Image (cartoon, rainbow, N blue to C red):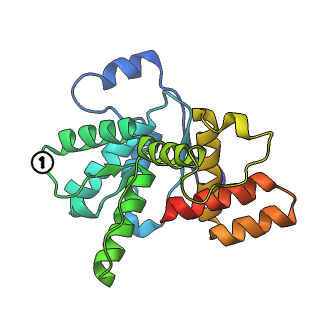
Amino acid sequence: MTTPDGQFRLVRPAAAERRGSASGGAALDPTQRLVVEHRSGQGPLVVLGAPGTGKTTVLVESVVARVDRDGVDPARVLVLGPTRRAAAALRDRVTGTLARTVTEPLARTPHSFAFALLRRAAVLSGDPPPRLISGPEQDRILADLLAGHAEGAGRRPDWPASVAPALGLRGFRDELRDLMMRALERGLTPEDLSQLGKETDRPEWVAAAQVMDEYLE
């Protein structure tokens, strides 16, 4: 159905309609067909719907329509999925329906797309491409840094006594990594984080800033 504000809201189809859509091709209801027939020149379109209302089917059919009907190059189509599994499933459905291969992934996660943009920007500016470090790799780096501090190597951060017993725990490294990532997202340097820790009486932030400095090196 179409809402007063111009959005499209999908509703769960009846059992008979679901059975019909399972046999050879997607059977679209009138609202779904309006979404698929929407042209790019008509502006952006918001589609809302609860689980089971056919959002994914409409998405796949919309991509296919733009490629087969409108002649859009598949490499210029981007579908974002919340997880790698969801993106892979979308990619398989779209390419399977199109019955053709494409040079660029049609479906990605937001993180994968963002990393591709960073790599492209680095190549265009002549800088070395960024390296993607996985969560387990980050944890291993932090574990090595903290183990070195425990052995007296490097610049040993002055952790508060309340934190010291947790230094060897995976949960502590997760919290430390999250703190550093949030600081970097906000454009904070280790010096900024250290100063902020002093101003707010958070000695654990001051110690974390020292680890962050070594981590970035």
Residue name at image x 31 percent, y 36 percent: 89
- Residue ID at (74%, 60%): 206
Q: List x then y, in percent, for residue 178.
A: 61, 49
| Residue 99 picture location, percent across and down | 13, 43
Position of the N terminus, as image quadrant, is top right
Q: Residue furthest left?
A: 100
Q: Tell me the kind of residue under disc 1.
A: Arg
Picture quadrant where residue 27 is located: top left
Q: Is residue 22 above or below residue 170?
A: above
Q: Which residue appears farthest toward the front when viewing the image?
A: 152
Say which of 8 and 133 sits in front: 133
Residue 197 appears in which quarter of the rendering? bottom right
Seen at 68% across and 71% down, the residue is 191
The image shows residue 170, relative to residue 142, as above or below, that is above
Residue 57 in view in this figure: no
- Residue 123, can we see it? yes
Seen at 35% across and 17% down, the residue is 19
| Nearest the eye: 45 or 211 | 211
Residue 146: percent from left, percent from top? 56, 46
Query: Is the residue marked by circle 1 packed among few (<14), some (14-19), or many (20+) residues within 10 Å?
Result: few
Per the image, the residue denoted by label 1 is 100
Instruction: Point out residue 110 in the picture as x, y percentages from the top left corner.
Output: 44, 53
